Image (spheres, rainbow, N blue to C red):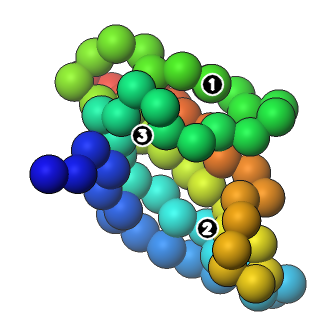
Amino acid sequence: MTDDWGNAIAVDTAEYAYVTGQTRSRNFPVTIGASQVSHAGGASDAFVSKISLAGNSLVYSTLLVAAG
């Protein structure tokens, strides 16, 4: 069973991929400067992650308190 679900993906003009979704994970990977660095304690939190051009690392990743 996984605790992370991707809901959408978009690519910007520089070809970076952005993934959004939900997580229940208590150790979801976030990057320095993230808006929210730990799970807020509810059923799940939303996340936004920017993926490197090579697809092998995170440029930016943060959690966001999910509504409801």
The residue tagged with tag 2: helix, strand or loop?
A: strand
Q: Nearer the viewer, residue 9 or 3?
A: 3
Q: Position of residue 43 (x, y in %)?
A: 22, 24
On the rendered image, what quadrant is the C terminus found in? Answer: top left
Q: Residue 62's mark?
A: none
Q: Mark 2 highlights which residue?
A: 18
Marks 2 and 3 sit apart, C-alpha to C-alpha, by 13 Å
Left or right: 24, with 14 as reference point: left
Q: Residues within 10 Å of mark 3 (few under 14, many from 20)?
A: many
Point out the tag, 2 or 1, that comes first from the N-terminus: 2
The residue tagged with tag 1: helix, strand or loop?
A: loop
Count up the numbered dots. 3
Instruction: Name which quarter of the figure residue 26 lies in.
Output: top left
Point out the tag, 1 or 3, that comes first from the N-terminus: 1
Which mark lies nearer to you, 2 or 1? 1
Left or right: 19, with 59 as reference point: left
Which mark lies nearer to you, 1 or 3? 1
Q: Mark 1 highlights which residue?
A: 37
Q: Residue 46's mark?
A: 3
| Residue drawn where x is 26% and y is 44% of the image | 3
Circle 2: residue type: Tyr
Query: Residue 12: in sight, yes or no?
Result: no
Q: Position of residue 14 (x, y in %)?
A: 85, 84
Q: Is residue 7 above or below residue 66?
A: below
The residue tagged with tag 3: helix, strand or loop?
A: strand
Q: Position of residue 21 (x, y in %)?
A: 39, 53
